[in-house]
Image: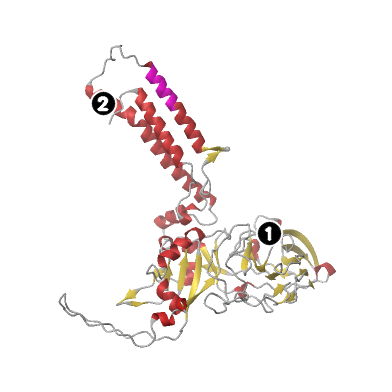
């Protein structure tokens, strides 16, 4: 339809701007990891404090006022203006009438492309979907798998102590003891777990009580290599102060190739702070050149065990040689205890190298699009190949992903929860260690030496009315062995 009058064209432009204003009231949030580095991914677009929706509504109002003015200028008794040749008039009217729609659609495309280019620049030291796609076109890329780093073994990140002679540099422990923790709370299945639960990979800076109950420290923490200190006392409220020994800081931390990681259980707050002190070692003399409070985003909810990751690049601590922790517990309430492990600097490898291209993996549906080099577990002749790892999405998509794969929905978790357990493997997004990219878990079969079944295949022709008879079952049924029905 061609808009012949200027009044109608202005009304059309006003309505188009109103629709665009409505579209800009929400955040500019691409799906999943596509939003890394994208401006306004968590808020409506704005410039110099003015929201784009406000500016567009104002422009729509101005266009409406001009449309009203054009309507008032119309004189019904005046002779109609002389029209040009019919073909020329149609072409001119079509160009004028469609110009607002074409211009606004073009500007929207330019806006989206510009935000993705901005994300590529913003995430140049980390991961962005645009850069990964360009790399894939120009060469070869495993997309997100190449940007995620995996910590194979926590003990490999243990830091050696540094001998010092200054009184203020010596370790001090008052009220904190080694490996004294509350008894692990039983899980839903009635058994005690020794690892972190499969929960969200990142949480907000404001800590709230979640589902992560206190258990034994994660594998690798405790003992002499990475000691665990705790103010917990079974007799009542424990309090005190602790200062760990100075530990050697490796180059991978000062160069930004790995963070300084502190595992914490209990409560962190004004009465129970932990501070990382970074020092410069000159012979046997130590000068403290920087401090960082332990806090912010964590790998799980309190009060259970979770990691805090300190990126020291671009800070005075990047020039340090050694690091130690200073903690205090002045909380007199029974639940105000604090426990932490001495810092470690993980040794990281690419997830592509850690998992490999031939290892069977169970990928929740949102993550499969950004891990093209990993292999899904197979199902042949009705027999499922046991996956060795599972990839989960970020916190925002985790609930929908679990619902899709749940037993109630007929998903793979229906059999996976019966035959195996999951243990979270620490992972880090390159250059942005606190970013929630998702989660990697290792699948541990309950029967590790199970033999594969013997399968006989063949083909037979049967009529549509043929039946093999009722199914028979021998031994325990799935409801007898399922932990969900105990």
Label 2 vs 1, first from the N-terminus:
2
Where, by quadrant of the figure, is residue 386 drawn? bottom left
| Coordinates of residue 459 in the picture (x, y in percent) | 20, 80
* The quadrant where residue 405 appears: bottom left
Can you identify the residue that label 1 sits on?
Answer: 318
Q: Which numbered tag is attached to residue 427?
A: none
Residue 85 placement, left or right of 39: left
Q: Is residue 71 magenta?
A: yes
Q: Is most of the magenta stretch helix, strand or loop?
A: helix
User: Bounds of the magenta span?
Assistant: 63-72
Q: Which mark is residue 90?
A: 2
Q: Position of residue 76 (x, y in %)?
A: 31, 14
Q: Secondary structure at mark 2?
A: helix
- Residue 387 shows in the view: no
- In front: mark 2 or mark 1? 2
Residue furthest to the right in view is 167
Q: Is residue 202 above or below residue 163?
A: above
Q: Is residue 292 above or below residue 25?
A: below
Q: Is residue 132 left or right of residue 349?
A: left
């Amino acid at each position: 339809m061609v808009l012949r009058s200027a009044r109608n064209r202005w009304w059309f432009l006003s309505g188009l701007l109103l629709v665009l204003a409505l579209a800009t009231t929400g955040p500019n949030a691409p799906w999943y990891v596509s939003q890394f580095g994208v401006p306004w991914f968590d808020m409506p677009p704005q410039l110099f404090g003015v929201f784009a929706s406000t500016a567009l509504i104002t422009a729509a109002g101005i266009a409406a006022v001009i449309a009203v003015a054009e309507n008032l200028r119309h004189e019904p008794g005046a002779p109609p203006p002389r029209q040009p040749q019919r073909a020329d008039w149609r072409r001119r009217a079509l160009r004028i009438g469609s110009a607002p729609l074409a211009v606004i659609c073009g500007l929207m495309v330019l806006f989206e492309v510009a935000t993705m280019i901005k994300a590529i620049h913003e995430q140049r030291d980390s991961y962005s979907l645009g850069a990964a796609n360009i790399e894939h076109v120009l060469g070869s890329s495993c997309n997100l798998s190449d940007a995620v780093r995996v910590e194979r073994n926590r003990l490999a990140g243990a830091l050696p102590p540094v001998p010092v002679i200054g009184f203020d540099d010596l370790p001090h422990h008052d009220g904190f003891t080694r490996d004294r923790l509350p008894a692990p709370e039983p899980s839903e299945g009635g058994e005690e777990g020794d690892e972190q639960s499969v929960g969200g990979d990142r949480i907000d800076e404001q800590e709230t009580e979640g589902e992560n109950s206190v258990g034994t420290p994660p594998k690798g923490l405790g003992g002499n290599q990475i000691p665990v200190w705790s103010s917990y006392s079974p007799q009542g409220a424990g309090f005190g102060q602790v200062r760990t020994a100075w530990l050697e800081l490796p180059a991978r931390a000062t160069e930004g190739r790995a963070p300084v990681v502190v595992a914490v259980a209990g409560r962190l707050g004004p009465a129970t702070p932990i501070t990382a002190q970074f020092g410069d070692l000159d012979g046997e003399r130590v000068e403290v050149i920087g401090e960082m409070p332990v806090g912010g985003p964590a790998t799980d909810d309190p009060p259970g065990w979770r990691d805090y990751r300190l990126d020291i690049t671009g800070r005075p601590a990047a020039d340090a040689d050694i690091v130690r922790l200073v903690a205090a517990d002045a909380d007199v309430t029974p639940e105000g205890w604090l426990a932490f492990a001495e810092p470690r600097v993980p040794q990281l490898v690419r997830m592509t190298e850690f998992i490999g291209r031939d290892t069977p993996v169970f990928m929740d549906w949102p993550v499969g699009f950004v891990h093209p080099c990993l292999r899904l577990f197979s199902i042949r002749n009705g027999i499922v190949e046991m996956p060795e790892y599972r990839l989960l999405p970020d916190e925002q998509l985790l609930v929908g992903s679990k619902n899709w794969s749940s037993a109630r929905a007929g998903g793979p978790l229906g059999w996976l929860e019966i035959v195996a357990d999951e243990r979270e493997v620490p992972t880090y997004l390159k250059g942005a260690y606190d970013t929630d990219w998702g989660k990697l878990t290792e699948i541990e079969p309950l029967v590790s030496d199970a033999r594969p079944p013997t399968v006989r295949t063949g083909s037979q022709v049967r009529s549509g009315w043929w039946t093999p008879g009722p199914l028979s079952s021998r031994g325990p049924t799935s409801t007898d062995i399922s932990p969900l029905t105990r």
